[in-house]
Image (spheres, rainbow, N blue to C red):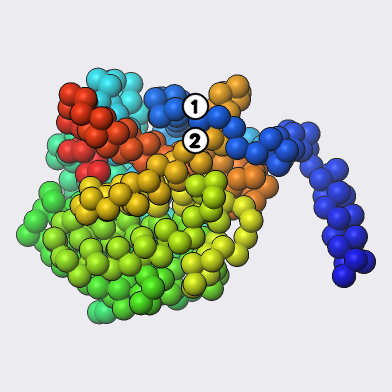
Amino acid sequence: MVLRATIQLARSARDYAQLPSAMRAAQRRDRREGLGADPGIAWAVGQGLAWLGRAQDASATQDGGVARHYSLADGWAASYPETTGYIIPTLLAHAQLRNDDRLRERARRMLDWLVSIQLPGGGFQGGMVNQTPVVPVTFNTGQILIGLAAGVSAYGDVYREPMLRAANWLVKTQDANGCWTRSRTPFAGPGEKAYMTHVAWGLIEAARLEPGRAYAEAALRNVRWAVTQQNSNGWFDRCCVGDSAQPLTHTIGYALRGLLEVERFCNDRLLRAAARRTADGILTAIRDDGALPGRLTSDWRGSVSWSCLTGNVQIAHSMLILYDKTGYEQYREAAYGLNRAVRRTLRVDDPDETRGAVKGSFPIDGDYGKFEYLNWATKFGIDSYTAEQRIRERETHEPTSRYDRRFDSIAGH
């Protein structure tokens, strides 16, 4: 045992010495200093929006999409269609909140780019825009559909036809049991996936705009299948891109949010009960620092020491939705703690390339988005912090704020 530990330490020291200086500095800062001070919701939201703008401008492919990430090793990545899709409603919501035409213009550039790369059948590719093979992928199409629907709501019929093509393709390619297995991504493992409920959410957004096209029925088929994969303790089987025995909190967050959005549309008490089972299980996994371990096992125990920051803010937002529905204060307090833990990883003195962005993992050398700042982590953080602000202002009996009046109706939160 002593020899094995000594060898591991030597390997770690060797690996650390071989890292570029920026990566070594970031790793050292996270591991030595730990979580910092909370910069506050206003700073985190404002700087997060500004970083998403820089990520659009600096994308390696310079096409109007948002760079997948900024890497301390390689710099700005190419545009990522999937996450650009669901970044759009976040920008549109805050454009209205702030009366900011620059955010509206950014969202429109994203929409126009996505329409330009839509595949002939209506689907969208997986991965970054410069990755191959270029084939239609269910999950990515569902996320882009959320953005196209927001585009129809904001700008009218110019984006309706692309929205209908994407939604129709999803309905056409759905399995009879509600799953999607025919157009899987080349960048994840095979098989049925419970987190496809986040695709069902895209169909729900299309159904709000086109209620007579069976989109809601397809969404409901999917989430009802997903509930058959749920254990009595709220755990979802088949809920990871790779390792279903210890899924990322990111994909658990996808599954929970999709379930909640379909429940919200259908007002189905059985779906709400299923969402609560999962939320109650997650409550038992939260650490003393307010965060979740990055991967969990079926008894809701952490299997890694690092935290997946994306999963933290995704799950926090779902907890806030559940709190609004149920009044159960543990959901609210857990969400506040999860959000705070992520905000405490933000550094106000970071350079433009990273200031306001959310890392893949904390510490930064964790195994999700290692040494990367991710556009979707930043987007989900903005959404969850904004939802937290809305509740805090409401419950301190302040006058109804712009967050309460506008964000709730625009973004469905």
| Residue 283 found in image quarter | bottom left
Q: Please report the residue visible at 40 percent of the width from the left and 49 percent of the height from the top.
A: 334
Residue linked to disc 1? 39
Name the one closer to the observer, 92 or 134.
92
Residue 61 falls left or right of residue 412:
right
Q: Quadrant of the C terminus?
A: top left
Q: Please report the residue visible at 26 percent of the width from the left and 58 percent of the height from the top.
A: 260
At mark 1, the secondary structure is loop
Residue 25 falls left or right of residue 384:
right
Q: CA distance from mark 1 to mark 2?
A: 7 Å
Kind of residue sitting beneath label 2? Arg
- 10 Å neighbourhood of mark 1: few (<14), some, or many (≥20)? some
Residue 343 bears which disc, if any?
2
Across and down, in percent, residue 258 comes to 30, 58
Q: Is residue 85 visible?
A: no
Cβ atoms under marks 1 and 2 closer than 8 Å: yes
At mark 2, the secondary structure is helix
Q: Please report the residue visible at 54 percent of the width from the left and 50 percent of the height from the top.
A: 288
Name the one closer to the observer, 191 or 117.
191
Residue 110 falls left or right of residue 60:
left
Q: Is residue 316 visible?
A: yes
- Count how many numbered circles sit on residues in the image: 2
Kind of residue sitting beneath label 1? Pro
Q: Quadrant of the N terminus?
A: bottom right
- 10 Å neighbourhood of mark 2: few (<14), some, or many (≥20)? many
Q: Please report the residue visible at 79 percent of the width from the left and 42 percent of the height from the top.
A: 19
**Is 265 situated above or below 56?**
below
Across and down, in percent, residue 403 comes to 24, 30
**Is 277 situated above or below 377?**
below
| Mark 1 or mark 2, earlier in chain | 1
| Residue 170 found in image quarter | bottom left
Across and down, in percent, residue 85 comes to 35, 45
